[in-house]
Structure formats: C-alpha cells, structure tokens
Amino acid sequence: MKLSVISIAIAVALAGCQAGHQSVKSVGLDNTGFMRLWNTYEGCQTSLDLGEMRSYERILSQEMLSATRIAEPLIPLPTSIQRLVTEPKPRLSVDPKAMAAACTLYTGQAAVAIGRNDIAVEMFLSVISRHPQADYAYYVAQAKEGLAQVTVAGRSGAPQLVPVSLSGSSARPPTALR
C-alpha cells in the first residue's frame, strides 16, 4: 500500500515538472511580432535582389534560433529527471524554422538562376545542416537537388539549369502556416 502511494506521488511530481519548470522565449505572440516575421518572409519570397534576399534569410534564421531557444529551468533538476522533462512547443501561428528554410532555399535557387553558385552552395548547405528534422524533409530534399544541380553545372564548365523541384513526385512543400 505504501509503495503504491509513493509511486503515485513520484508520478505526480514528475508530471508537475513537465508542466511548469521550463519556459520558451516566445517570438511573435503579439500581432506586431507576427506581422514583422511574416513581412520578412514575404519580402524574401518576392524580392528580386540577391543581397536583400540574403538579408531576409539572416533575419529569419535569427528568429528561428530565438523561437526555439529554451530558457534554463527555474530550479536545477537532477540529470536523471531533466531527461524526462519535455520541451514546451512555441505557440505561434507560423513555424519560424519552416519560414527560414523556405527563404534560404529560395535564395539558393535565385543564386543558381543568376550564376552565383558560391552563394547557392552556401544556402543549400545551410538548409541541409540547420533542418535535419523530419518536418523539414521537403526543404532538405530540395536543397540536395539544388546542390546536385550546382555540382553538375560546375563540372560541365557552363551553367546548365536543371529544375530544382521534385518533378514527377507528389511531394509538395509544407506550408509555413500551422
């Protein structure tokens, strides 16, 4: 009997740890923050200037990092318990990581189109390294195709534009909206 009471008390304590001891630095929870983030994303998608697109990409990447940064627990927890504590999900109407991935990918594709393969490689590698999670597989696949495209163009000596989309596939880009 005592053992079951102790087990229940431990389970309740652990559940309480998951609910309240970590907080997320929130980004975009107010309308102004959301609109700033959305306008940056939209600017990236509509810009024709590569320098401007890279600037938007940097801003979105910084927002992505700050939106996913977890604050330190209010009280220090033993390592054995810390691994049981789940990270709270940011409550945003957009996914800053998806927006950053889409902007970076678009910037890489635009760089290929104007022959700036150095920038294209930088952008494609950035997508691949920053977004290994399954939620961003579309962007990583597109970046790998773009990287292959740049490699093919570099070997032949003359730029050969190959479509970056997954032609013939049912894959569609995930939306940045959630």
Image (tube, rainbow, N blue to C red):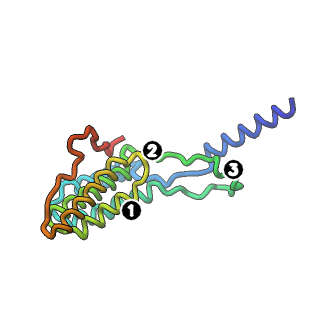
Q: Which amino acid does label 2 sit on?
A: Arg
Q: In which quarter of the image is residue 178?
A: top left
User: Looking at the image, which residue is at 37% across and 43% down?
Assistant: 93
What amino acid is at disc 1? Gln
Q: Do the residues labelled 2 and 3 touch (CB within 8 Å)?
A: no
**What element does badge 3 sit on?**
helix
Q: State the image quarter where residue 60 is shown.
A: bottom left
* Element carrying mark 2: loop
- Judging depth in this view, the residue of 95 and 124 nearest the camera is 124
Name the residue tied to disc 3: 81
> Which residue corresponds to mark 2?
91
Which callout, 1 or 2, points at the residue further toward the start of the chain? 1
**51 relative position to 94: left or right:** left
Residue 62: mark in rendering: 1
- Is residue 40 at least partly visible in the picture? no
Q: Which residue is drawn at 39% across and 49% down?
A: 30
Q: Nearer the viewer, mark 2 or mark 3?
A: 3
Give the residue furthest to the top. 1
Label 3: few (<14), some or many (≥20) within 10 Å?
A: few
Query: What x and y, as percent, mark residue 75?
Result: 68, 56
Circle 1 or circle 2, nearest the eye: 1
Label 2 – label 3 distance at C-alpha: 25 Å
Q: Distance between the residues labelled 1 and 2?
A: 18 Å
- Kind of residue at disc 3: Ile
Vertical order, 115 against 171 (above or below) = below
